[in-house]
Amino acid sequence: MADADRLDEFERLLAEAGGRLHRAESLDAARTVARELIGEGTVARWHDGTLDAIAAREAPPAEADVSLIVADVGVQSTGAIGWAHRAGRPRATGLLPTRQIALLAEGDLVASVPEALRKLGLTSSSPPANVVFAAGPSRTSDIEQRSIRGVHSPRELDVIVFS
Amino acid sequence: MVIEPSSGVRVQLFVTCLVDLLYPEVGERTVALLERLGCEVAFTREQTCCGQPALNSGHPVAARTVAGHFLDAFAETDGPIVAPFGSCVHMVRHHYPRLFADAAPRQRDLARTLGARTTDLASFVVDVLGRSDVGGRYPGSRDDAPVPVAYHHECHLLRGLGVADAPLALLRGVAGCTVVETERGDLCCGFGGTFSLKMSNVSVAMADEKLDRALAAGARAIVSTDVGCLMHLEGRARRRRLPLAVHHLVDLLEPDGRL
Amino acid sequence: MHEHPQAEPDAGVSLNLHRAAGNWARQRGVARARVDWEQWREQARAVRADAVGHMDELIDLLSRRVSAAGGHVHRARTAADAREHVIRICREVGARSAVKAKSMTSEEIGLGDALAAAGIDAVETDLGEYIVQAMGDRPSHLLAPAVHLSAAQVAELFSRESGHTLDPDDTRSLVDHARDVLRPRFLAADVGITGANLAVAETGTLVLVESEGNIRLSTALPRVHIAVMGIEKVVRDWDGAAHLVQMLPLAAHGVPAAASTSYITGPARDGDDGPEQLHLVLLDGGRSSIQGTEFEAALHCIRCGACMYACPVYRQVGGHHYGSTYSGPIGAVITPLLEGLTPDTAELPWFSSLCGACVEACPVKIPLDDQLVMLRARAAVANSAAAGRRPDPEGALFRAWAALWSRPATYRATAATAGRALAPLWSTIAREHEDGGWHTRAPFPFSHFTDGRDALGPDPEPFHARWRRRRG
């Protein structure tokens, strides 16, 4: 599948899962989109160069409105983004704020789940301690089968893909 | 309507104990239909029952005794073995191999070869004889006022044997009725053999769901192939005095069929 | 043949279950359209068959890999062993509070009660489980534990908890209440206790799948993570795990991926802020006794819940009537196998009309209908053994039936008796209404048939007699 089709498919599945895709032509453009999405909110972010020059007001994860992370991989066949936790990438950051924004480089969008697992090092002899794949925001239908987005972890997920 | 006779296929009727004892007209109509389609129908009086009631009730030894006789009854016959519905066919094809897995070679081989020869009426007519329209008429109906009928998929035919289209195709060829779509027509009617006795309340609730859905779709009759389902659904419809007739498919394909 | 005493259709439960089953049936179509479903099922079956067939060896490999990654492995032969491990670990780390994320295995071993008895404050964090725990109730469905409850009941509970009146139709506010109650519990908990959907032996990785985010919170914030898992959940390698992790959400919800999937290999490392300790409690609980038997395929189950959504009997009676942790078709099979055949568990294989909907729904092709029939045979043997010298009526009935019906002459004689003599006799005795062959009361052993239906009596002239008369 051509790259354009791959991104379209990813966008469709992400949307079905309740997330939103934004396209940016460059990392700088992506940062601009992120700034617009954040608006007046406070941000908890990972320490990753990709996320520099975005956040205005930072706050601890338990108080911030928005979390800002980097996705190591996107999966075309499921609409999910994935990442590995390590120093500078606290788990709490992505879990506590109600909204989540993730930046994903287009070259990191792979076709399938097996590829994504390999790319994150899970199939190597020493996988990372914690890898997470998120397909859309959290959800439940535990009350009379009514579908609600956003339980504990993010209620909203915005993925900004940049070339 | 011209019906071409087929090449005089000799067919063994596997009437099933339920049809034999409770629904003999279904047996007669089955024979009449097959003969109209050019088959020579043989009926071995050796046959009794396939053994399914005992197996499903948790008595495989008793089932095997009776099933062993089934093997003997059909061992010396030739030609396709045709039953009016699927669940006994499923017993022979699916369960006999395991039932006779540690039996003598003769029985093991017979279980396999007879299973391969055994099929249900609708599949035989459509897939073997190549006839997906054999006409027929809904009793007492007029062409300008077709009776809406709901088709109930017999579980062992639909899921056990993978047959969905053949009986529906035949039903659609029947004059004087029209098939209405019911919600979840693939759901079990709740008969399940001895289940209807052991969990009678649940069994009846499942029948009610089936009957209510048929009525909601505007049907005035339910058509199926398994006489166990028919007996259970009609019994419940009668108890509730519902305006629903219950028919075997062959009742419509060959309404005047007699031996 | 006796009627199961408790399994009555329950209208309230039934309504929710019907809605859930309807949603699932629609989504199922979507799932099948996305992939070559039958080929995927066969592959999933093969992966599970390989894993369960080599369970001992793969559990050993898994244990070595988890330890190499810095985790601790604890083997538990019984539920009591598993409970002891968890309580001991909690005591060793000085845990006073715990958050529990969705785990049928922890329900199976009765962990909730054990934690409470040990003075550890453990709250269920899965929304349905939280509701059920707060109501002092028990979960009724694998994926939707509160499916038997109404929004009104939930709103009433949450209104009492919060001190404000919550509107049952404002589902958002109900969910937000649960989030507000649980957030401080996550932040304060010493221990996070979860199950695991799969464990990859190749690298010692636990795979945890969820919708709500409570598993990630339970495995991120507390300093100790305890995972309790049945030994049958192991898979050999990443090829198999990758396939199953895609299969699970497709079978369960018809979607290509769960909201969150966590892959956990040992405790936190490399400056990651996760738990300092990872403990894996591996539960046998009777599973190894099923391996190597004709029921081994039941261990292939990946706990997707599809069979429950498909089953028309489950939909009528709800999960509680199964009286065990696991309900629905898979529950009816594994409960007597794990717990042994008791008078109660021996009823479970009868919670089925053998319609095969579960077999069709199962992503790993477990032949549940055949297994239910085999269990009925086991139950019948157990019944007759228990009956001892007293005659076992049902067994005797079928033996007599077999003797009569394996000979054409006696088969025909039975038909003649039933058709010509018994029916009118019964009409007289039972003073019941007879109409065109239909009776309002059926004789022993069929009497329950006419509890809710009329019964068709035997025809005075069976087919074989008609053939004899007309065709010689």
Image (cartoon, grey):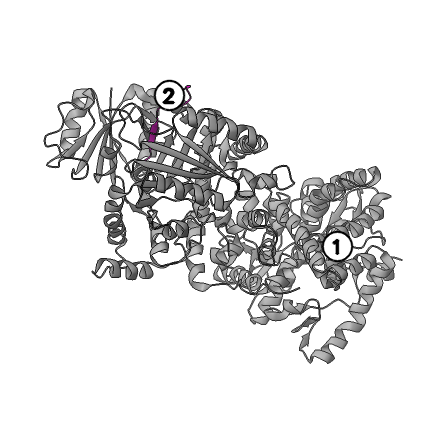
Q: Is residue C245 above or below residue B196?
A: above
Label 1 sits on a secondary structure element that is loop
Image mark for residue C60: none
Residue that numbered label 1 is attached to: B16
In percent of the image, x 37 and y 58: which residue is there?
C136
Q: Looking at the picture, how far across and down is residue B145, in whole percent?
A: 55, 62
For disc 1, the chain is B
Q: Looking at the picture, how far across and down is residue B160, in whole percent?
A: 63, 45
Left/right of residue B47 with respect to residue C41 in the rendered view: right
Question: What is the CA distance from the residue labelled 2 to the residue labelled 1?
Answer: 61 Å
Q: Is residue C453 above or below residue B159?
A: below
Q: Which of the 4 image quarters holds residue B179?
A: bottom right
Q: Looking at the picture, how far across and down is residue B200, in whole percent?
A: 59, 64
> Looking at numbered disc 1 in the image, what kind of residue is underneath it?
Thr
Residue that numbered label 2 is attached to: A121
Q: Which is the main secondary structure of the residues drawn in magenta?
A: loop
- Total numbered badges shown on the rendered structure: 2
Instruction: Give the magenta-colored segment's residue range.
Output: A118-135
Marks 2 and 1: which is nearer the front?
2
Report whether residue B41 is seen: no
Query: Quick one: label 1, few (<14), some, or many (20+) residues within 10 Å?
Result: many
Residues at discs 2 and 1 in contact (Cβ within 8 Å)? no
Which image quarter holds the C terminus of chain C?
bottom right
In percent of the image, x 35 and y 37: which residue is there?
C225
For disc 2, the chain is A
In percent of the image, x 78 and y 38: which residue is there?
B113
In-front residue for pair B44/C175: C175
